[in-house]
Amino acid sequence: ELKVEQNPLFLSMQEGKNYTIYCNYSTTSDRLYWYRQDPGKSLESLFVLLSNGAVKQEGRLMASLDTKARLSTLHITAAVHDLSATYFCAGPSFYNNNDMRFGAGTRLTVKP
Amino acid sequence: DADVTQTPRNRITKTGKRIMLECSQTKGHDRMYWYRQDPGLGLRLIYYSFDVKDINKGEISDGYSVSRQAQAKFSLSLESAIPNQTALYFCATSDFKNIQYFGAGTRLSVL
């Protein structure tokens, strides 16, 4: 079964700094999803990465996928306070594309 | 109005009670899901459905049941609630890329 591991689980960073969140998954998967959850809110889709080498960027966030390494990264450039949230990666189970497995989430706090 | 609507938003119940959480969607998606979220564990899939005749168990279906009353409605039932079912429950739909669209969540406490 697909296991999804994120690290770090907690990240406190200063505004203006760069950092990367890592998402490792245990079995072959050709797609990976990133979601954002603000405190007390629901999850919203950020990126869907559909093939090896896929890179998507939105504002200060950039996500990439390396299916051979079973690794996706979410890179934060010049962080701002508004990026404070919990970020989840998720991937479909190897046997069933509809059985989505989520990582535990990375709680990001951006301090002035 | 929200595309995926969950009711109630909060619910407190007692051990042994039967409760139902409801979800409706206006996105026109065939696929609907129920997840629970626990601190430090991310989201875990309870059940999912492709249409009213297709119901599938997810990772943690024990103690739960579902009903797909129509394309737009998918309800989750706890037949006899227990304290370890205290969690935040999300309903979701998905598109052809399997991007999940979540409701606002139902916070359930079982005393």
Image (cartoon, rainbow, N blue to C red):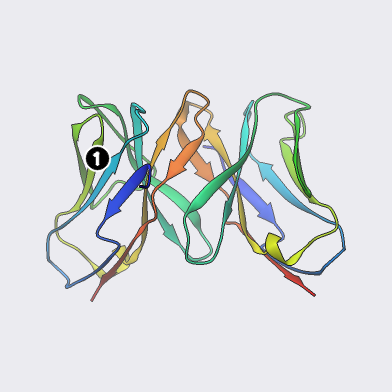
Residue A36 against residue A94 in the figure, above or below: below
Residue B79, x across and y down, in percent: 14, 55
Q: Quadrant of residue A69?
A: top right
Label 1: few (<14), some (14–19) or many (≥20) C-alpha neighbours in 10 Å:
many
* Residue lying at 27% horizontally and 46% vertically, measured from the top left: B23
Q: Quadrant of residue A17?
A: bottom right
Percent position of residue A19, x then y: 83, 57
User: Would residue A43 appear left or right of A34 to someone viewing this image?
Assistant: left
Chain identifier of the residue bearing label 1 in the image: B
Residue at disc 1, secondary structure:
strand
Left or right? Give the position of A111 relative to A88.
right
In the image, residue A71 sits, relative to residue A95, either above or below, namely: below
User: In the rendering, at what x and y percent does residue B48 appear?
Assistant: 33, 36
Residue at position x 37%, y 56% from top?
B105
Q: Quadrant of residue B69?
A: top left
Residue furthest front as drawn: B1
User: How many discs appear?
Assistant: 1
For the C terminus of chain B, the image quarter is: bottom left
Q: Name the kind of residue labelled 1 in the image.
A: Phe
Residue that mark 1 sits on: B74
Apparent side of residue A60 relative to residue A87 in the rendered image (left or right)? right
Viewer-closest of B83 and B100: B100
